[in-house]
Amino acid sequence: MRKREGNKEKDILDAAVKVFADSGYHRSKVTSIAEAAGVATGSVYLYYPNKESILLKIFDRLWTDFTHTLQETVKRSDYDPVQKLDLVIDHLFNIFVANPALAVVFVNEQQYLINNKKGNIGKHYENFLDLAEEIIHEGVKKKIFNPDVDVKLYRHFITGGIRSVLFYWAQSTPSSSLDRVRLNVKLFLRNGLLL
């Protein structure tokens, strides 16, 4: 694969997100991605050997960003665990508010990649959940969060819940605001953890 020239690779990835959101990953074609990006189909193949490698790149970037932000948040001593949880949720939702098509792709394709052990997505996901657990453990230790919370169970509840509400949002009418979903996720998570 050749090196990036201008913004062509970014254009391809942005177009792929839109095409995957509109048609679904499995029904999408590389030719549709190329057309949406305004490049020749051959140009797509200069950057990515196949459609799956495009999807993996989208998720790799997304999870790398999520994990980096969470690592920085966990380290912060100027915020309590509730504020840290809010920061993480805000970061996740800010990405999806800025790019609703990415939220749709995330909801529709994340589990496929994890179940089929594609790329490093499962590893990214587990690292992210491990870091999120640190915030919950910190909250329990500081007597902010309920000590009876089963952290392993809660981590799956949180991720399943967020995925489910994002799916609900993606399938709902345009009147359903992603910011409103964010607010409700924060309320659910806080109320489930606080003493």
Image (cartoon, rainbow, N blue to C red):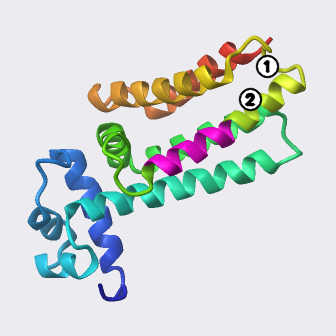
Which mark is first along the chain, 1 or 2? 2
SS category of the residue bearing label 2: helix
Decide whether residue 127 is among the magenta residues.
Answer: yes
Query: Is residue 60 positioned above or below 183 on the image?
Result: below
As drawn, the label of residue 136 is 2
Residue at x-position 29% and y-position 84%:
1
> Which residue corresponds to mark 1?
145
Q: Position of residue 123 (x, y in %)?
A: 51, 50
**Residue type beneath disc 2:** Ile
Q: How many marks?
A: 2
Tell whether 61 sits left or right of 131: left
Query: Is residue 168 positioned above or below 85 on the image?
Result: above
Quarter of the image that includes the C terminus: top right
**Mark 2 and mark 1: span between their CA atoms?**
7 Å
Q: Are marks 2 and 1 in contact (CB under 8 Å)?
A: yes
Q: Main secondary structure of the magenta part?
A: helix
Q: Quadrant of residue 194?
A: top right
Query: Is residue 144 positioned above or below 35 on the image?
Result: above
SS category of the residue bearing label 1: loop
**Residue type beneath disc 1:** Phe
Tag 2: Cα neighbours inside 10 Å, few (<14), some, or many (≥20)?
many
Q: Position of residue 159 (x, y in %)?
A: 51, 30
- Stretch in magenta: 122-132
Instruction: Return the residue nearer the eye: 120 or 169.
Output: 120
Decide whether residue 42 is among the magenta residues.
Answer: no
